[in-house]
């Protein structure tokens, strides 16, 4: 895929799952909802995402180490003349690399990927408590144009 200074963006592999789960758990929200990175449910979810042509689990790798991750989901719909949308989810950077521009490079890569695929819009959600993330997305040109709702089923 694409390289950015010392960073390679590539599809995640099964062996990356523990590192990805560790990043998902490394904040105030993830710490309460993630479990053992070797739990079989994570591997089952990885297999499902990996097999779906409308989902891409991407990692940022530096010197052989997974240092970032995000999931891109491509959504079909009738609005905007049937245009496809790219939904960016679960954006994470390892703690040691935060504040060094990797997140910015990841999002720009994702936007370019969506554009190459012909998507009409890129969208994402961010928990209300992630105020630093909101400033980050604002600085990248995203607009807080909608109100999102979620209903936890478990």
Image: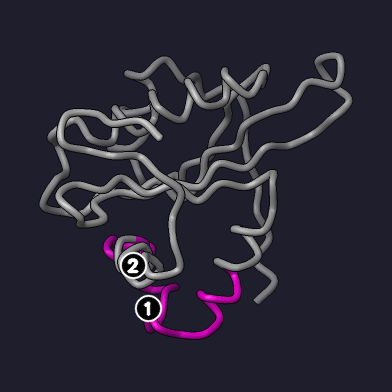
> Judging from the image, what secondary structure is the residue with disc 1 in?
loop
Q: Is residue 39 magenta?
A: yes
What residue is rendered at 89% in x and 25% in y? 78
Whichever of labels 1 and 2 marks the residue nearer the N terminus, that label is 2
Q: Is residue 84 magenta?
A: no
Image-based side of 131 in relation to 95, left or right: right
**Residue at (46% x, 48% y) in the render:** 11
Task: Give x and y (percent) for residue 76.
Answer: 80, 34
* Residue 1 position in % (x across, y down): 40, 35
Q: Pointers 1 and 2 in contact (CB under 8 A)?
A: yes
Quadrant in the picture for the C terminus = bottom right
- Mark 1 nearby-residue class (10 Å; few <14, some 14–19, many ≥20): some
Residue at 19% across / 30% down in the picture?
Answer: 101
Q: Secondary structure at mark 2?
A: helix
Residue 131 is situated, as x and y percent measured from the top left of the image, at 32, 38
| Residue 143 x, y percent position in the rendering | 50, 19
Q: Residues within 10 Å of mark 2 (few under 14, many from 20)?
A: some
Is 38 placed above or below 100 here?
A: below
Using residue 121 as the reference point, say whether residue 14 is left or right of it. Answer: left
Q: Which residue, given by chain and number where applicable, does mark 1 sit on?
A: 37
Foreground pick, 147 / 54: 54
User: In which quadrant of the rendered view does residue 64 lie?
Assistant: bottom left
Boundaries of the magenta span: 24-45
Q: Residue at x 63, y 24 (%)?
A: 117
Q: What coloring was used for the rendering?
A: one colour
Q: Which residue is mark 2?
A: 25
Above or below — where is 14 with respect to 59?
below
């Amino acid at each position: 895929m694409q390289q950015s200074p010392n960073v390679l963006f590539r599809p995640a592999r099964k062996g990356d799952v523990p590192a990805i789960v560790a990043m998902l758990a490394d904040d105030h929200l993830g710490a309460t909802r993630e479990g053992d990175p070797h739990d079989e449910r994570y591997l089952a979810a990885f297999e499902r995402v990996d097999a779906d042509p409308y989902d891409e689990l991407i990692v940022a790798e530096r010197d052989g180490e997974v240092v970032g991750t995000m999931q891109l989901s491509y959504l079909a719909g009738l609005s905007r003349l049937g245009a496809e949308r790219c939904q960016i989810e679960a954006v994470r950077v390892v703690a040691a690399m935060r504040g060094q521009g990797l997140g910015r490079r990841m999002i720009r890569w994702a936007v370019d990927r969506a554009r190459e695929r012909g998507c009409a819009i890129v969208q994402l959600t961010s928990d209300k408590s992630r105020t630093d993330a909101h400033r980050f997305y604002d600085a990248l040109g995203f607009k807080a144009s909608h109100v999102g709702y979620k209903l936890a089923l478990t």
